[in-house]
Image: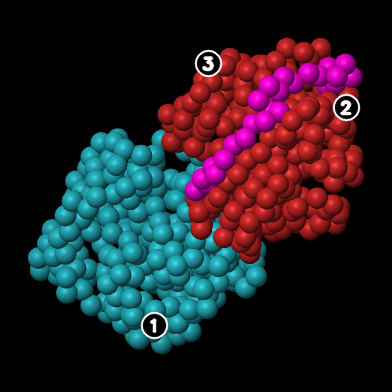
Chain colours: A red, B cyan
Amino acid sequence: MSLIIVGSIALDTIETQAGSVSDVPGGSSSYCSIAASYFTTPHVVGVVGEDFPESVITLFKDHHINQAGLVSEPGKTFRWGGRYAENFDERTTLFTELNVFETFNPTLPETYKSADYVLLANIHPGLQHHVLDQLESEAFIVLDTMNLWIETAHAELISLMKRVNMLVINDEEALMLTGERNYGKAAQKLKDMGPEWVVIKKGQHGALLFHESNVFAVPGLILDKVIDPTGAGDTFVGALIGYLAQSKDHSFDNMKLAIVFGSVLASFCVEDFSVNGITYLEEADLEERYDAFVVMSQF
Amino acid sequence: MSLIIVGSIALDTIETQAGSVSDVPGGSSSYCSIAASYFTTPHVVGVVGEDFPESVITLFKDHHINQAGLVSEPGKTFRWGGRYAENFDERTTLFTELNVFETFNPTLPETYKSADYVLLANIHPGLQHHVLDQLESEAFIVLDTMNLWIETAHAELISLMKRVNMLVINDEEALMLTGERNYGKAAQKLKDMGPEWVVIKKGQHGALLFHESNVFAVPGLILDKVIDPTGAGDTFVGALIGYLAQSKDHSFDNMKLAIVFGSVLASFCVEDFSVNGITYLEEADLEERYDAFVVMSQF
């Protein structure tokens, strides 16, 4: 058992300047799992309602996502609606209908409990604790979170940070958690809170990786078209841990590559609505995009 | 005759959270020339007052800056005072006393007119035009400017852009000039306005270089201490053109290195007040800092 991913599975309604879509695949787990599937077999833990489209189940199957931990409950699937401002600087939540997700209590199938890599995708820190409580292995654990939990579940998040190997957050969340605007100082404070690896995502400015005294910066790719940024962060961390689970190499140099492949998949993600940008990619697509990062940053 | 640099020479009074200094060396030309001096002999064109300290003239001499184009006029040297907000996000101008700079009319000494590289450091676009009018050679011309000239001397700046090879501006100025938030689109519009090379500086997020369909990104170094950001942009462009003037290689790969060395010097600049961070550096200092950029960005 290599990689398990625990997060939300949703049907999203999204409005951007490029158009709008409704009831499309969304949720942290959907993006993470599809992105990770390019490197390893992700084992997903989540809940959907009776109305979850068979087409999405097929999509997951096509991406070799193990769905033994995916439960279908009576009722409707978690739904989220959001609208982006013209330049994607701001996002307004239009509605949140938790539905079956309201009582989600992630339960690991027996075979999942020996996972080597665990991605705690963005859900309530209490549920993330509960996942770790069920683990029977010494896994490499990556934690994703969001501003909502920093505000509303602060104590649970702080205690959770002591249980994980890597924290992945964006620059605003890093500032919220540490009060530091200097990335180096913020990362040091975050490492002092538990995780030995810290990744700070900076949107179009790329991402920073911190470990011991080392820092690595990957730039944001310059893209001609950005259609929908939903799930870009989930895609980034999904590909990152997928690459790690495949390579099983925790050296700083290999972690750099995991960050680059996270950026490669995230750059595809924003080029289309929902998960459309990251489905059915060919190895040549990934190589071409990886080469673009090489040209852009190697001297 | 290799590199000439035309800009302002000032005595600055600066307040940051780290402390304050008064009547210290400042102005675009001072930073640019000292930064360029690590790679080639800069030939400076500028004006100072009778009160200009002999110690700064000595400092310029120590850095092998040719001062044949430096004129001393009756009256006081240009003075500028500024205060930075706690996180350096904002800068307030406390005073601007133009003094001898008010009637500055840059005149190139005969020997300067055959320059191969010209840095039009940040001064009024009308004066920058006047410098180019005196040139008798086919030089590689780099243009620096600021928000003030975009607002108050727009037409002169636009016509100037058709006469230069490279434009170096920050992200806010790129937005002001093009109305584009997308860096790729902004750079394309700027190239369409004249310069075949465009550099967009992003402060702590580093800088982007655009040429034809190529993009290069250098990250911002993570620094433990930032004392005074004054002149960091001037230092960046000074080192950049200094490196170019030394190497005489306008390939994209070599331009990448010029950008990296610009970033190396700029990272030293912000670590101390005024030009203190970039004076009397040893080759080993530059190599060590260059290696930090390699570790931080190469995978």
Q: Is residue B217 visible?
A: no
Give yes or no for residue A269 being in the magenta stretch: no
Q: Residue at x 36, y 39 (%)?
A: B87
- The disc labelled 3 sits on which kind of residue? Ala
Which residue: 67% across, 54% down? A21
Which of the two marks, 2 or 1, is nearer to us in this view? 2
Quadrant of the image occupied by residue A221 = bottom right
Q: Residues within 10 Å of mark 3 (few under 14, many from 20)?
A: few
Residue type at the position of mark 2: Ala
Q: Are marks 1 and 3 in contact (CB under 8 Å)?
A: no
When the figure is inspected, residue B152 is found, relative to residue B29, above or below; the finding is: below
Please name the amino acid that badge 1 sits on.
Ser
Q: Where is residue B207 drawn, in percent x and y?
A: 52, 56
| Sequence-first tag of 2 and 3 | 2
User: Is residue A20 shown above or below A122?
Assistant: below
Chain on which label 1 sits: B
Q: Residue furthest left?
A: B75
**Left of B127 or right of it: where is B263?**
right
Dot 1 corresponds to which residue? B159
Circle 3 chain: A
Task: Check contact, mark 2 vs mark 1: CB within 8 A.
Answer: no
Highlighted magenta segment, given as a residue range:
A90-115
Secondary structure type for disc 3? helix
Mark identifier at residue A68? 2
Tell me, for residue A155, which label it has, or none: 3
